[in-house]
């Protein structure tokens, strides 16, 4: 054999090897390549309609030609009632976009072996896709609103109850119910397609936020301190303002170390909230303003806070002594710049109640009993005489006042405030 012949044989052998490798690679690739077929395999049905060996588009056409909408109303039931749903009002129709997605998922997909295994499985367990219907959205929204009015029950938290003897008890919590809208939106069309005549409304149980066991663990056991002040019921606007602020305070619960803000809790004293014009003390003078009188509520609360050992963070006296508490024991508030703030100093939660009984405001705090009784005393009370000056408009004068206020707990005495109510000059011609 010549050298040229040897070269040709070698080249032929190489080419043959390459060809064998290429064919082997292509055959192997055809088996391992991931592929999605375009024809549905045998064993795929939409309800009882055989869509085997059809493209998705052709399958949709077959369903459209052979489907009949069930002509039945559905009775929706729940534990305490029922409701007959007039299907015709909901304009049911096949949801072809959703059905197309489900049929697309039924196409063989994957390697050759995966697709073959999928087709074999369909011989034993055919894939049945339920008809998918959709209802008129507006009518469905009306249905959910109507069901809500019939079915929904609000969850009720456990609550503290205080009787006339200031004894604490706890009411039990109650779970609530509401319609599970997402499940209803899924189940209703499905049950309709199956021709069912009765369907239970899917419900969600709403757990209350606070249980009796939770409240019991807070340590609110008994009355800690109480304070009350008297007001004039004949000043109707002022009395209404007091009642609004008291109602906002009633039921306040503070965690250990939590800060209370009168302005944050009661909110703005504005006409839109129901507050009315009534007398207020500004710069030592009586004038009229929206929310007048609310300072008596903050003052009553302030004295309650002192008697219960709360840590006072912010408190401001009025510009002149008020009639409903001794000097040095008042607390002025104005929503935008004056606040009463204190911190719960107890190791447990506290409950603050507030109520108006006849001509008195009562503020009480419940929690853990105090170790020592707390008292409030005022000392170094000093009257500052007013001065008489000449002017064009006569005005009565009023003496000023200086006073120191203390809290006494056992053998401990703590200075709480030193207040100075400026005198008002008398003006004579």
Image: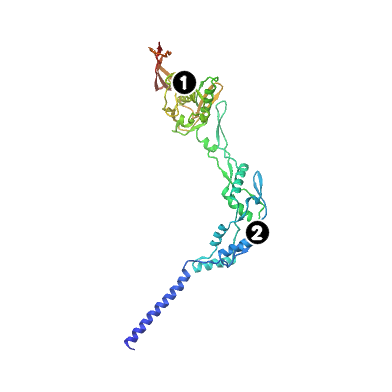
* Crowd around label 2: few <14 · some 14–19 · many ≥20 (10 Å): few
Q: Separation of disc 2 and disc 1 at Cα? A: 79 Å
Q: x, y percentage for residue 141?
A: 59, 47
Q: What residue sits 48% from the left and 31% below the top?
A: 265
Above or below, 379 against 75 in this view is above
Q: x, y percentage for residue 117?
A: 53, 67
Residue 13, labelled with which disc? none
Q: x, y percentage for residue 274?
A: 53, 29
What quarter of the picture does the C terminus occupy? Answer: top left
Q: x, y percentage for residue 366?
A: 50, 29
Q: Quadrant of residue 319?
A: top left
Q: Quadrant of residue 169?
A: top right
Per the image, label 2 sits on a secondary structure element best described as loop
**290 and 28: which is toward the camera:** 290
What quarter of the picture does the N terminus occupy? Answer: bottom left
Residue 68, labelled with which disc? 2
Q: Earlier in the sequence, mark 2 or mark 1?
A: 2
Q: What residue sits 41% from the left and 76% below the top?
A: 21
- Can residue 380 be seen in the rendering of this structure? no
Q: Residue furthest top?
A: 429
Per the image, label 1 sits on a secondary structure element best described as strand
Q: Residue furthest left?
A: 3
Above or below, 204 against 52 in this view is above
Q: Are marks 2 and 1 in contact (CB under 8 Å)?
A: no
- Can residue 88 be seen in the rendering of this structure? yes
**90 and 187: which is toward the camera:** 90
Above or below, 394 against 135 in this view is above
Write down the residue under mark 1: 287
Q: Residue furthest bottom?
A: 1
**15 and 292: which is toward the camera:** 292
* Crowd around label 1: few <14 · some 14–19 · many ≥20 (10 Å): few
């Amino acid at each position: 054999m010549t050298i040229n012949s040897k070269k040709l044989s070698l080249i032929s052998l190489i080419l043959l090897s390459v060809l064998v490798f290429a064919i082997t690679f292509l055959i192997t690739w055809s088996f391992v390549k991931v592929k999605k077929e375009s024809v549905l395999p045998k064993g795929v049905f939409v309800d009882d309609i055989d869509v085997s060996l059809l493209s998705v588009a052709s399958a949709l056409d077959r369903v459209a030609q052979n489907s009949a909408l069930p002509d039945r109303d559905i009775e929706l039931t729940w534990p305490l009632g029922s409701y007959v749903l007039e299907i015709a009002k909901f304009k049911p129709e096949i949801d072809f976009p959703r059905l197309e997605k489900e049929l697309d998922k039924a196409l063989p997909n994957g390697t050759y072996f995966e697709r073959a295994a999928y087709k074999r499985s369909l011989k034993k367990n055919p894939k049945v896709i339920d008809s998918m219907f959709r209802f008129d959205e507006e009518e469905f929204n009306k249905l959910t609103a109507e069901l809500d009015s019939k079915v929904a029950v609000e969850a009720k938290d456990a609550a503290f109850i205080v009787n006339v003897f200031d004894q604490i008890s706890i009411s039990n919590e109650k779970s609530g119910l509401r319609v599970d809208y997402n499940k209803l939106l899924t189940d209703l069309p499905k049950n309709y397609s199956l021709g069912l005549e009765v369907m239970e409304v899917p419900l969600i149980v709403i757990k209350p936020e606070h249980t009796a066991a939770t409240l019991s663990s807070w340590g609110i056991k008994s009355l800690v301190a109480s304070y009350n002040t008297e007001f004039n019921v004949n000043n109707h606007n002022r009395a209404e303002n007091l009642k609004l602020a008291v109602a906002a305070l009633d039921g306040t619960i503070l965690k250990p170390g939590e800060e209370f803000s009168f302005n944050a809790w009661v909110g703005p004293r504005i006409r839109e909230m129901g507050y009315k014009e009534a007398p207020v003390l500004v710069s030592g003078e009586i004038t009229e303003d929206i929310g007048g009188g609310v300072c008596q509520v903050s003052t009553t609360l302030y004295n309650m806070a002192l008697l219960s050992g709360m840590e006072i963070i912010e408190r401001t006296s009025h510009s002149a002594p008020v009639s409903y508490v001794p000097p040095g024991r008042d607390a002025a508030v104005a929503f935008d710049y004056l606040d009463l703030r204190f911190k719960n100093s107890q190791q447990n939660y506290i409950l603050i109640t507030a109520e108006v009984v006849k001509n008195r405001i009562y503020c009480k705090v419940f929690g853990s009993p105090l170790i020592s009784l707390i008292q409030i005393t005022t000392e170094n009370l000093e009257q500052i005489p007013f001065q008489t000056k000449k002017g064009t408009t006569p005005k009565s004068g009023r003496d000023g006042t200086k006073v120191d206020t203390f809290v006494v707990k056992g053998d401990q005495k703590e200075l709480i405030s030193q207040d100075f109510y400026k005198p008002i000059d008398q003006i004579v011609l």
